Amino acid sequence: MNLSELQEIATLKGFTHHFSAAGNHVTCDGKEVSYSANDLTIIDSRSVDSGTDPGDDATLYMIEARDGTRGTLIVPSSFYTEHEKAELIDHLRNQQRESKSGNP
């Protein structure tokens, strides 16, 4: 499965917006709202591994904001990852672990 196919699947599941990480906030296309990482939850993620060019590998995150906005964030794999995106995903994963373990 390629990234384009993953984006189609996400759209069919209602993840119609695209999130962008910038500094300490996240923006969303078509909305004049900035979100903090605490406003977001990873619902699902899917990775693409082309096997030939590491620069083509990426993970598509399906994310929901507290206000119900659903969108995607694409994060390239390995050393191609942008610093802001990597920090955001790390923060969201830690939030999920804490909420599953019952820690505040």
Image: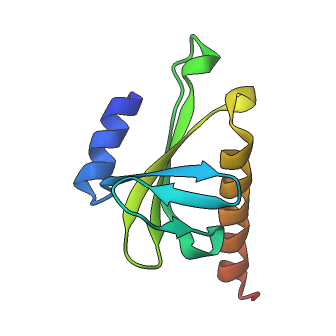
Q: Nearer the viewer, residue 95 or 18?
A: 18
Query: Coloured how?
Result: rainbow
Residue 20 point in image, percent of width and height: 53, 49
Residue 49 point in image, percent of width and height: 54, 26
Placement of 48 over or under 8, stated as above or below: above
Which quadrant holds the N terminus? top left
Left/right placement of residue 30 relative to residue 104 reads left
The outermost residue toward the top is 52
The outermost residue toward the left is 12
The outermost residue toward the front is 32
Placement of 72 over or under 52, stated as above or below: below
Placement of 20 over or under 79, stated as above or below: below
* Residue drawn at point x = 27 percent, y = 50 percent: 11
Q: Nearer the viewer, residue 26 or 79?
A: 26
* Residue drawn at point x = 68 percent, y = 35 percent: 81
Left/right placement of residue 53 relative to residue 29 reads right
* Residue drawn at point x = 65 percent, y = 32 percent: 77
Left/right placement of residue 63 relative to residue 86 reads left
Left/right placement of residue 60 relative to residue 38 reads left
Which quadrant holds the C terminus? bottom right
Residue 24 point in image, percent of width and height: 70, 60
Residue 61 point in image, percent of width and height: 50, 51
* Residue drawn at point x = 27 percent, y = 58 percent: 13
